[in-house]
Image (cartoon, rainbow, N blue to C red):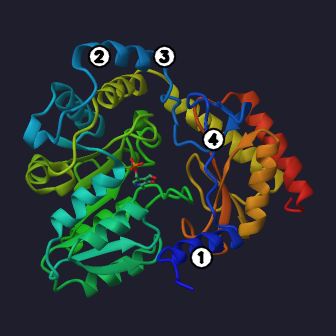
Amino acid sequence: MIKSKFDFITEELENLKKESRYNYIRVIESPQDSWLVIEGRKKLNLCSNNYLGLANHPEIIQFCIEGIKKYGIGPGAVRSIAGTNVLHIELEKKLSEFKHTEDTILLQSGFNANLAVIPTLLDSPDDAVISDELNHASIIDAIRLSKAKRFIYKHLDMNDLEEKLKEASGCRRKVVVTDGVFSMDGDIAPLPKIVELCQKYEAILVVDDAHGEGVLGNKGRGIVDHFNLHGKVDIEVGTLSKAFGVVGGFVSSNSMVIEFLKQKARPFLFSSALTIPDTLAAIKAIDIILNSDVVERLWENTRYFKTEMMKLGFDLGSSQTPITPVMLYEESLTQEFAKMLFEEDIFAMPIFYPTVPKNKARIRVMISAMHTKNDLDFALEKFQKIGKKLGII
Ligand SMILES: Cc1ncc(COP(=O)(O)O)c(C=O)c1O
């Protein structure tokens, strides 16, 4: 029999199913909100990164409709070829003010923003990148695209980071890169110590603040503000797809770094710009974040839900943020728990290998400012019911 050239795909897909690691993607029939319509039924939304409830905000929708009438939809091409829209400039200025940095460059996603920074800074095998072992996939891929030697330090382990910096001491350029908030565990990088080590070993520090902006610091300005380290972190990578409720990415830094990225970063030079509606929405989102209590509401909800879940006896790992991993460890148990939650009208995603290490499976609950106390109580009741049924609490 002739073996099909695609047999390997069939085998891999079957393996994923056998190992309870197959992703079943739900279809949402309503806007992103605290409740979603899935398969014609309302489900409580506990899995979106829409931290501040801005993905379907009426003021943002109105602002976009008016802006689209004036500026249209598409950007035409990449900015270096088709020119840049005034809205891109306006958003970059607003993000720089929000982050207290000199300048900002927009990219199409947070993933692309990491791809824009690391390979552009490190283009020789004489360079070194020193990275936390639990950094986001986009940082890992950005490192793979760079030509630098790789040094991976143990998660949050500052002694190990210093060891790796010593090992890299002969290298031409050194970049230390870390998530600010780790997206699967919700723990926070010890940024003051990382800054100190980068200064000592003359390394450039890149922090991916995807889960920090809109969440940490005064008015959600992010992890740098949280630790009061303005001017001490060289490069901040950001996303518009989480707290800002839209889609897109950016890098904030000093003017020289941003000018360099605009001249050399391949995702900027070879991929089209953010769309007009995304740009408009992000502009308005910043105004709402700065002029409302959405960030405070996010934290009130987070404190309430986590305290009550711990009282029930759930293991929430090491989270310090609204990312709430309900640790179940075993893949099939986690799949079963998520399935039972769904039957009880709760949409919360099971997360397992390779997104997290093997035997570290969890239900990842994402708390948002848009949840009401009734929503959270509904979730707590269902977690308790299923936790008891499965013998977890
Ligand atoms: C730490 C981190 N960086 C980057 C990204 C990618 O962001 P985006 O969805 O904008 O591509 C994510 C999203 O999951 C993330 O968690």
Q: Which of the two discs, 1 and 4, sits closer to the camera?
A: 1
Q: Secondary structure at mark 4?
A: helix
Q: Residue at x 40, y 79 (%)?
A: 159
Tell me the kind of residue under disc 1. Glu
Residue that appears at 42% across and 27% down: 289
**Cα distance, mark 3 to mark 4?**
24 Å
Residue carrying label 1: 11
Type of residue at label 2?
Answer: Gly
Mark 3 or mark 2, which is nearer the start of the sequence?
3
Viewer-side residue, 75 vs 331: 75
**Circle 1 SS class:** helix
Horizontal side of 340 relative to 46 (left or right) equals right
Marks 3 and 2: in contact by CB < 8 Å?
A: no
- How many angstroms separate mark 2 from mark 4 (CA)? 34 Å
The residue tagged 2 is 67
Location of the N terminus by quadrant is bottom right
**Marks 3 and 4: which is nearer the front?**
3
Q: Nearer the viewer, mark 2 or mark 3?
A: 2
Q: Picture coordinates of residue 100 (x, y %)?
A: 25, 39
Examine the rendered structure and indicate whether residue 65 appears above or below residue 19. Answer: above
- The residue to which callout 4 is attached is 302
